[in-house]
Every structure is written in C-alpha cells, then in structure tokens.
Amino acid sequence: MAAMQSWRKAYGALKDTTTVSLANLNSDFKDLDVAIVKATNHVECPPKERHLRKIVAATSIARPRADIAYCIHALSRRLAKTRNWIVALKTLVVIHRLLRDGDPTFREELLNFAQRGRILQLSNFKDDSSPIAWDCSAWVRTYGMFLEERLECFKILKYDVEAERLSKQGQGPEKGHSRTRELDSQDLLEQLPALQQLLYRLVGCRVIISSLYAKTSRRSCKYNYLVQYALALVLKESFKIYCAINDGIINLVDKFFEMPRHEALTALEIYRRAGQQAGSLSDFYEIAGV
C-alpha cells in the first residue's frame, strides 16, 4: 500500500510538471494557466495564496470579459478531466475563493457559463485509489452541490448573502440585520425557500466517513487538512445564511396574520423547516468541532 501511494504521488507530480510545461506554450494566457495548475496540483495541501492572487487579478473588473471567461473555462476543464480527489477539491476551493474574495464579474460570467453547462456537476465523481480517496470523493460531490446551490440562490436573491453588510437598526450596540428583515411578503416567500435550500446543501457538507479503515484511522477524511480547510470556508458561509433566514422568519411572523390563506400556508412550511434546520445546523457544528 505504501509503495502504491508513493507511486501515485510521483505520478501526480509528473503530471503537474508536464501540465505546467504545456501551459507555458500558451502565449496569451500562460501566466493564468500556470497559476491554475499550481493552485490545483496533486499536493495534499490548500492552494497557495500567491497563485490565488494571480487568479483573482486575472478575473478582476479591469480585465476583459473574454479573459474572465477563459479562466472559468480553464477551471471547468481542470475539474472535468481529473479523477484525483485532491485536484478536484482544490479546484472547487479556488472557485469558492473567487466567489468570496473575487470581483462580482467572475460570478456573473460563471452564471453565464453555467447556463450552457453545469461546471460544478460532480455527481459521478469518484476516486477509488484508496479508502481515504473514496471517502473524500463523497465530500467533493457534496461540496460541489453546495457551490452550485450558492449560484442558484444568487439568481433568486440577486445579491450575495456572504458579501452583504448587516444594516444597523436605530442606535445602540445591537447587532445588524439582514435585508430579509425588511422584505415585503412576496419577496420574503420567494427568498426564504432559496436560502433554506442553500443551508440544506451546506449542512450536507458534513464530513462523510464510510469505510471501516476511515472510521478507525487518523488519516480519515474527517482529519484531512485539505478537507478541513474547505470545510472552514463552508462554515464561514453558514453564519450569514442562518442570520438571513432567522431575520426573515422574524419578518414572516410579523406579517403572518395579514397574509392571504395560500401565502400563510407557505409561511407555515417555511417556519416548520426553519425549526428543523436549526437542529441540523447545531449537529453540523458539533461534527465540525465548532
């Protein structure tokens, strides 16, 4: 087993070197191609910040839309071709970081790209090279579904919950509120289910440990540093998502007795699901060690 793992690492390093060499032949986007390959290589550690900075710069609003579209195409190609869970997970991390820290034009172009094909569709992804690879493959698939849902939620809300600044209500030290606190009934009944579905996908990112080896080994998916890094990004998203849902529920209760019957029934279902998700999120935090 150890010899096989050493061979796979050597083979992965060789593939990375070859891909970087080929990227250097691309005269138009070689710096971006090299940064993407190095940020998503076979080394079992998070993408290095210097490579991420180059990718973020290449997708800024100052760059032509064609450059941003090329970056998305390159990331999509990287994700589609790999059968290695490390490369797949690091590519998803890069996309997630660009959604969180990059320019909004990247998200807009990603949405345009997604209309032609689902870039993050990883339902059939599988790396069965080892027990830990098998377990991490399951987490890669659920992480991909969360990022897909993140884009779907943005299409409905027309704003990014994570990038939202909480607004202060009046004076004093009390915490700010999400914009869901001020929505009218129609927008509220449209946006809250989208936010709840996003939270459902987020909670689905709980670490999956399926094999007997993983359950008894410190080298399981749960203890993997690369998985923990990606999981930390997901956990950061949970706070504002839950805050937006919670503020929306408060708003919903205030408006409930003024709603027509069909809207009131929808509101009751939203309220019921909110109660269930509060418990699921608490369990998720416990599993994640928060």
Image (cartoon, grey):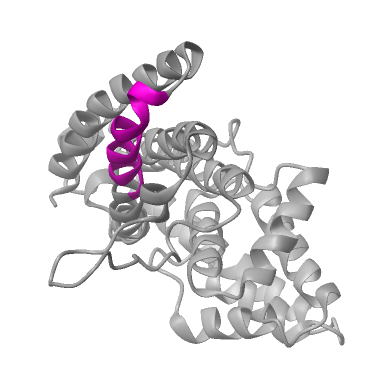
Query: In the shown orientation, is residue 211 left or right of residue 71?
Result: left
Outermost residue toward the front?
258
Residue 285, above or below 43? above
Residue 275 visible? The answer is yes
Q: Measuring 48% from the left and 17% from the top, which residue is drawn there?
A: 260
Count of numbered badges drawn on the protein? 0
Q: Measuring 44% from the left and 36% from the top, which residue is drawn there?
A: 192
Q: Measuring 61% from the left and 53% from the top, which residue is drawn there?
A: 158
Q: Which residues are magenta?
A: 244-258
Q: Quick check: is 255 in the magenta stretch?
A: yes
Q: Position of residue 69 (x, y in %)?
A: 79, 67
| Quadrant holding the N terminus | top left
Nearer to the camera, 61 or 156: 156
Residue 42, above or below 251? below
Q: Measuring 62% from the left and 79% from the top, which residue is drawn there?
A: 55
Residue 211, above or below 244? above
Q: Position of residue 278 (x, y in %)?
A: 22, 33
Q: Position of residue 108 (x, y in %)?
A: 70, 61
Q: Quick check: is 106 in the magenta stretch?
A: no
Main SS type for the magenta part? Answer: helix
